[in-house]
Image: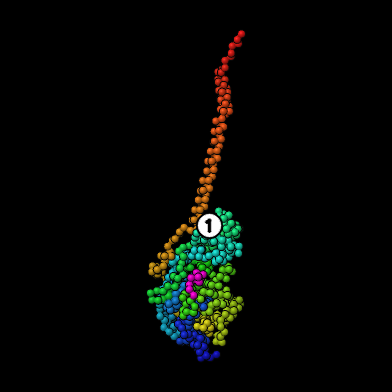
Amino acid sequence: MSLEKFKEEVTEGYTFKGDSIIMGGAMYDKNCLTEQFVRLPLKTFNRHGLIAGATGTGKTKTLQIIAEQLSLKGVPSMLMDIKGDLSGIAVPSDGHPKIDERHEKIGFPFIAGGSPVEFLTLSGEPGARLRATVAEFGPVLFSKLLDLNETQSGIVAVVFKYCDDHDLPLLDLKDLKKAIQYVTNEAKEEVEQDYGRISTASTGTIMRKILELESQDADRFFGERSFDVDDLCRHDEHGNGMVSILRVTDLQDKPKLFSTFMLQLLAEIYATFPEAGDSDKPKLVLFIDEAHLIFEEASDALLDQIEVIVKLIRSKGVGLFFVTQNPSDIPDDVLGQLGMKIQHALRAFTAKDRKAIKLVAENYPLTEHYDVDQLLTELGIGEAFLTGLNEKGIPTPLVHTYLRAPQSRMDVLTDREINRILDRSEIIDEYNEEIDRESAYEILNQKIERAASEEHREVIHKQRGRARREKSTLEQVLGSTTTRQIGRTVARELTRGLLGVLGVKTTRRRRRRY
């Protein structure tokens, strides 16, 4: 194929009627073609995407490019900052000769700029705390989270129903544990009469699975105040979309907590966002860095739930981008839903790696311009294969792309810079307020204490009644004539015996009369 034919295909495939963002310049025979721009249309960003590639190939910077360009177009986004290197998006780039050289090759000038940023956290990192209550999960989602069987899921449903019927708020994990213990012990007869029999073996399994969740600090996530997902869709005073950065640098060894959070977030967005239809741009875009953390320890039920939400959530105007090292990290059913794909270099150190790369190459549209599986191992830093969906939902041609540089800093912020952003936050005081209102844990403890107190008073009452009855019987015995006579006789005999011991005679011998 000739260069002119290639240019024609790229121009036709990457020209859109609506708004779009420039990702970089097209490359042919490993050379960047000036002003041959590769774009992604805003209209199809809710069709989801994939950013993949080996470590050090530029995935994070590609994520940064897309997020800051979306912000400039008025589209808010949320970024999972696993490695702690995304905070620099808040401040303009300091510039560099290599950046200017790159943009000169692409064919448009480099303009530095920062994005409005809100820091969020699930743990002890600085930022607004994200929380959700156990009740907001509901019994079905919570059972899938714990990978419970049908019987165990039924018990969780009973516990939720009992708490709902008796005004027992389930806010955190200690509320749920106390409720399970209560329906298994103190309220067992009542629950079995109204809701059915509960197996103690099953409740024991449920408790162990909750403890497993707690071991990954999930108790930090469950509670109040619940995060309002509408706060992810804010704009600054200039109309730029807010970039919410979730700082989760301490969650790499806690995949269960990370997948728990993601599942609840997606479910909450799907439940609360109105239908958006085919709008000109997405309402929100979520970037999930190190996406394998969601899938590697997720149960089959949890994976099914994620797959369903990924398929449905685009109707709410929400796009999802999964960022990972290899497309094989993403389940096939989810991978098939990702319309945009940006593939950075892969490394072929073994025969197994080469076979995997051939499979990766088959995920992309066929092209006569590139030997894809070979070129995948030769892509430089800041280069990638790119394909998206046009405004009619048709895949665009696969193009070797020389990516633009981020307009913002490609490095972390200092602690002082982070603190300045936190000081300007409009939501951090609201979400970081400690709330521990009366809930199921406290209410049930009070009921148990009252029941124990009433039982104690009843025991004391019975003991006193028995003592009164015993006293009355003794008084009757002691007051009878027979008892008194026996008493006098006993007393007389005792007196005689005592005086006899002392040598005193108690009787006189009568004279015999003649």
Determine the residue positioned at 57% across, 71% down. Answer: 304
| Residue 272 on the magenta span | yes
Q: Which x, y percent locates residue 504?
A: 55, 18
Q: Main secondary structure of the magenta part?
A: helix
For the question of whether residue 407 can be seen, the reply is no
User: Foreground: 277 or 417?
Assistant: 277
User: Foreground: 172 or 373?
Assistant: 172
Determine the residue positioned at 55% across, 30% down. Answer: 479
Determine the residue positioned at 52% across, 82% down. Answer: 393
Please tell me how crowded label 1 is: few (under 14), some (14-19), or many (20+) other residues with Cα within 10 Å: some
User: Foreground: 166 or 348?
Assistant: 166
For the question of whether residue 473 can be seen, the reply is yes
Here the colouring is rainbow
- The N terminus appears in which quarter of the rendering? bottom right
Q: Residue furthest front?
A: 481
> In the image, 109: left or right of 159?
left
| Residue type at numbered disc 1 | Lys
Magenta residues span 265-275
User: Foreground: 68 or 95?
Assistant: 68
| Residue bearing mark 1 | 178
